[in-house]
Amino acid sequence: MSLKANFYKNRVCLNVLAGSVDNAADIYDAAEGHVLVGVLSKNYPDVDTAVEDMKKYSEVTNNAVSVGLGAGDPNQSMMVSLISQHVQPQHINQVFTGVATSRALAGQDKSIVNGLISPTGTVGMVKISTGPLSSRSEDAIVPVETAIAMLKDMGGSSVKYFPMGGLETREEFACVAKACADKDFWLEPTGGIDLENYEEIMQIALDAGVSKIIPHIYSSIIDKATGNTRPEDVKTLLDMTKKLLN
């Protein structure tokens, strides 16, 4: 099974949650493979149970599994690293301070490991204190270029920029996107992205010249009754992506 994510036109790969193994298979088909299927560590009581179940998701998606924290919960950081060591997924979600541990335990440089940074209200500055202890301490705010350099130092692949909050932080996001492009680093916008604002958010990142983008679209495309992501919405997102890149 492949350790490398399947980017559409080598540029964009969707990231959506799966409510079940069958849902994961449907999502993968709807996205024509250009997707990372999120499975949340927080949904499992322990590492062994998570590993056993996530391997089933891996089998139906050609390993396009994204091991998630669960609502960005920093307390899940170590569990994500330990799960990923055994599952060897294509994608690992981490808080800023968990990146090096995930990369070291993965034992290879193919899996994408992101690091969570947050907007601050000031263009060009981001919050990196997103770990289990640091998130409860006074905010550590640094220039986005410094955050990217630190993520590279730790073996990270990409910035996970959360929360997007729709387009209220458009200038901040555009600045982060430009920094990622300038530093040849990948970008993962997440939080508040839906079918209505997806194209506009993606256009900002594409216009900035970001080499690879992994947009996370979660609750807005989940069927509340079943807990499953709607495959038809995933297809719509892929169609939008094709339009943006064609």
Image (cartoon, helix red, strand yellow):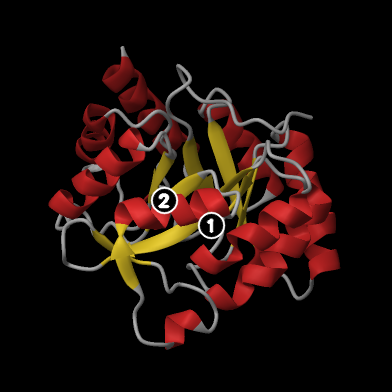
Q: What's the amino acid at mark 2?
A: Ile
The label shown at residue 226 is 1
Tell which of 169 and 39 is nearer to you.
169
- Please report the residue visible at 31 percent of the width from the left and 50 percent of the height from the top: 193
Q: Give whichever of discs 1 and 2 has the lower sequence position.
A: 2
Above or below, comparing residue 84 to residue 80 in the picture: above
What is the x, y in percent for residue 234?
44, 35
Foreground mark, 1 or 2, reads 2
Q: Quadrant of the N terminus?
A: top right
Q: Residues within 10 Å of mark 1 (few under 14, many from 20)?
A: few
Residue 12 appears in the figure: yes
Residue 246: x %, y % from top left: 31, 12
Q: Residues within 10 Å of mark 2 (few under 14, many from 20)?
A: many
Q: Position of residue 140 (x, y in %)?
A: 36, 75
Q: Check disc 1 and report its element: helix, strand or loop.
A: loop
Identity of the residue drawn at 49% across and 67% down = 72
- Report which residue position mark 2 lands on: 148
Q: For residue 222, say whether it is visible.
A: no
Is label 1 in contact with label 2 (beta carbons under 8 Å)? no
**Vertical placement of residue 44 versus 177, above or below:** below
Q: Could you tell me the amino acid type at mark 1?
A: Thr
Q: Quadrant of residue 128?
A: bottom left
Q: In the rendered view, does 205 fall on the left or right side of 40?
A: left
The picture places residue 107, in percent across and down from the top left corner, at: 79, 47
- The residue drawn where x is 55% and y is 22% is 32
- Give the Cα separation between the discs numbered 1 and 2: 38 Å
Q: Residue at x 53, y 57 (%)?
A: 226
